[in-house]
Image (spheres, grey):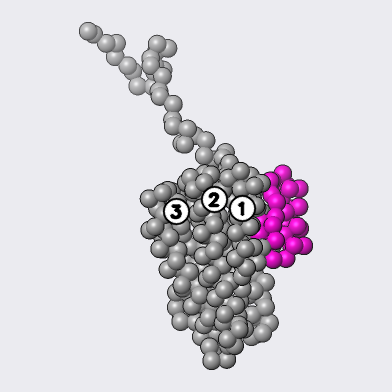
Amino acid sequence: MNETPTVPGTPMPATSTPAAPLPATATSTAAVGLLADKVAFITGAGRGIGAASARLFAREGARVLLAARTEHQLKAVTEEIRAAGGTADYVVCDLADPTSVRTAVERCVQLYRRLDVAFNNGATGQPPGPMDQLSEADFDHVCAVNLKGPWLAMTAEIAAIRATARRGAIVNTSSVGSLMGNPQLPAYGAAKRALNSLTESAAVTYGPEGIRVNAIAPGTTLTEMLREWDEKAPGTIDHLNAQTPLGRPAAPEEIAEAAAWLLSDRSSYVTGTVLRVDGGMWV
């Protein structure tokens, strides 16, 4: 059958077959929040990286439950999120108390009927200095909050995800100090390095169920914990900046962005990773 030749630049006839529409993922992702329709549980959410993450996750469409020890901080962040149009609530939680941790995760399911993602960000510091100057009580407390706490939380979160959303993601906050020798924060670095291992083991264990587990390793970040360290050892922040190619500390919001991506479906093939968010820090 003969066909009428088409002259370049000439509009196609009205009877031509229209092009197939682009997939929805190619046309609508810009308008959809990174965590739209997800329920997020966040520890250490009263200040610093946790508070920044709670605000960001809510802006990205998640319903969030904030957990930490200090109620007035939790209340202030929760009210700020609500005033901006987000959905948020809070629960007082002590990571060193197993019952408190489990109750906090259960509260999330009671409120929102599900759990999709969790950000285990809560932590405690240690008095800076060589390990032989650290008391046994301080060592035990650092390990209880920074290692046992996330273990307790992950155990409860995995059970909640299984029972409700069935698939999900968890992110733990580690530290760049877990990836190298840490003479000023030896117990803190050791606990965070153990958390890296726990993260990787959980990723291998629960990946077949569709539950991804990752960690972030922040570098110098302007949190209250860092400022307290700098007050006790003046010049600490300047020293850390000198080891950072970007030449500055991170804002908590920059760390929150990395956590949000790892919890989102846009990182759907990422698990078992300890993601450095450290400005390229070297030793």
Q: Which of the pair 3/260 is nearer the observer?
A: 260
- Residue occupying image coordinates x 62% and y 68%: 97
Evaluate if marks 2 and 1 touch, with contact meaning CB atoms under 8 Å apart. Answer: yes
Residue at 51 percent of width and 52 percent of height = 159
Q: Are marks 3 and 2 in contact (CB under 8 Å)?
A: no
Q: Identity of the amino acid at label 3?
A: Arg
Residue 212, disc: 3
Foreground: disc 1 or disc 3: 1
Q: Which residues are magenta?
A: 66-92
Task: Give the SS element for disc 2.
Answer: helix
The answer to whether residue 273 is seen in the rendering is: no
- Quick one: which residue is furthest to the bottom in this view? 132
Residue 160 — which label? 2
Horizontal and vertical percent position of residue 2: 23, 8
Query: Which image quadrant is residue 236 in?
Result: bottom right
Q: Give 180 or 43, whichever is nearer the viewer.
A: 43
Residue 213: where, in percent of width, then height?
A: 46, 57
Q: CA distance from mark 3 to mark 2?
A: 14 Å
Q: Nearer the viewer, residue 232 or 143?
A: 143
Kindly identify the amino acid type of the residue bearing the numbered disc 2: Ala
The answer to whether residue 82 is magenta is yes
Spatial separation of the CA atoms under disc 2 and disc 1: 8 Å
Q: Is residue 275 magenta?
A: no
Q: Using the image, determine if residue 174 lies above or below residue 126.
A: above
Whether 215 is drawn above or below 34: the answer is: below
Residue 70 falls left or right of residue 273 = right
Which numbered disc covers residue 106? 1
Which kind of residue does numbered mark 1 sit on?
Answer: Glu
Q: In the rendered view, would you say 111 is above or below 138?
A: above
